[in-house]
Image (cartoon, rainbow, N blue to C red):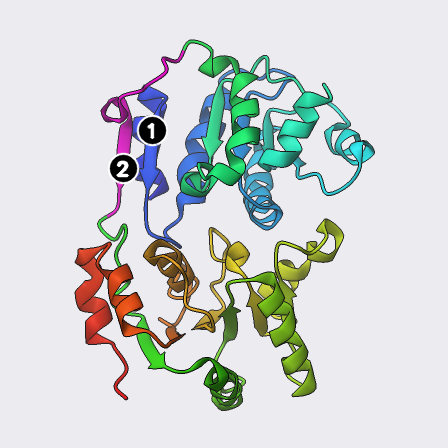
Amino acid sequence: MGARMFFPLKHSGVALCAAETGSGKTLAYLLPLLDRLLEKKLAAPRGLVVVPSRELAAQVGAVAAALCRPAGLRLRGLTGGGASGGLRRQLRGPGVAVLLGTPGALRDALRRRFLSLGRLRWMVLDEADTLMDESFAAPIEKILAHAPLAAGAPGFVDVGRFASLATQGLHRLPPHIQQKFVRLKGQDKLPELLQLLKDHPASGGAVIIFCNSASTVNWLGYILDDHKIKHLRLQGQMSAVARAGIFASFQKGDVSVLVCTDLASRGLDTSSVQLVVNYDFPDTLQDYLHRVGRVGRVGSKTPGAVVSFNRCIRFLLSIMSLFSSVISYLVASWYPW
């Protein structure tokens, strides 16, 4: 997808890129961004990539570093996670061409005047639908207020003026992924999950178990501990120090089971995952699509499977109705009981 996206961005400077999960969107924006930055090197942040989480920042940062290093472009990550001294240390050193950060850390650095975006020319909002959520509204507005490229923008922009590119698979469930929906009462979910993990072969790839709250992640983790099932937990209430390295350890295969909230459902590379379990069914179909996207990704050798525990058929059907184009996939794969 990166090569196709390169040309509209190269010529128009404004682009809206939408594609299904696991399709290579990171390279689609990094390649044209770095190409433009190479035209004129200045010792100041001229390219800014904003991502919603530290985990995604680490992943994108690894890809960007591999591209920036041979090109002679300096990259700096800004994800916070500590006192103001931590922000100072992250920004220490020679001027950078590309800055990669989370909304909260960028806002704090701007507020404390540790960072200037006076020479910024390019900005990327990765996982833009998440960054446009009201929970990110304040820091995103602060960042935009300091970005000179937004100074002359009108209050309303016609999206039709954007160069846009969308894949045919956008907002559709990948047909090659096996999906099973199991109707269960709340008290029956745990034994079903334990049996599912017991039956999952050691050679069957990694497993992600999604829960809707941090408390459920913690509770389920204690249960898995009692059953001697080695796993990792990842949820937003963990400290930055605790979260650091957890997903990287999962990606490396140190542990093959991850219990998490939707923090791990967007953007992160999970090519080793072959089974996703929705212990708690997601609130929206968009969230379901992102969870499903953890399997069958680019680079994955197997299509993978998704198992969802859900009690209320009406609730499921009401979510399905939001995207009529995918109803056939869901209905066709509904698990009989």
Above or below for 35 versus 235: above
Chain part drawn in magenta:
153-167
Give the residue type at disc 2.
Leu
Q: What residue occupies the far right of the structure in this picture? A: 85
Instruction: Looking at the image, tell me whether mark 1 or mark 2 is earlier in sequence order.
Output: 1
Q: Position of residue 135 (x, y in %)?
A: 52, 40
Which quarter of the picture shows residue 1? top left
Above or below for 115 versus 312: above
Left or right: 299 with respect to 138? left
Quarter the C terminus occupies: bottom left
- Residues under numbered marks 1 and 2 in contact, where contact means CB atoms less than 8 Å apart: yes
Number of numbered labels in the structure image: 2
Left or right: 49 with respect to 28? right
Give the residue type at disc 1.
Ala
Q: Residue at x 55, y 44 (%)?
A: 60
Q: Position of residue 93 (x, y in %)?
A: 77, 26
The reply to whether the magenta stretch includes residue 164 is yes
Q: Is residue 255 visible?
A: no
> Judging from the image, what secondary structure is the residue with disc 1 in?
strand
Q: Position of residue 281 (x, y in %)?
A: 41, 68
Residue picked out by circle 1? 15
Which quarter of the picture shows residue 257? bottom right
Q: Is residue 113 visible?
A: yes
**Nearer to me, 269 or 1:** 269
Residue picked out by circle 2? 165
The reply to whether the magenta stretch includes residue 98 is no
> Judging from the image, what secondary structure is the residue with disc 2 in?
strand
User: Whole-Å distance between the Cαs marked 1 and 2?
Assistant: 8 Å
Above or below for 108 versus 334: above
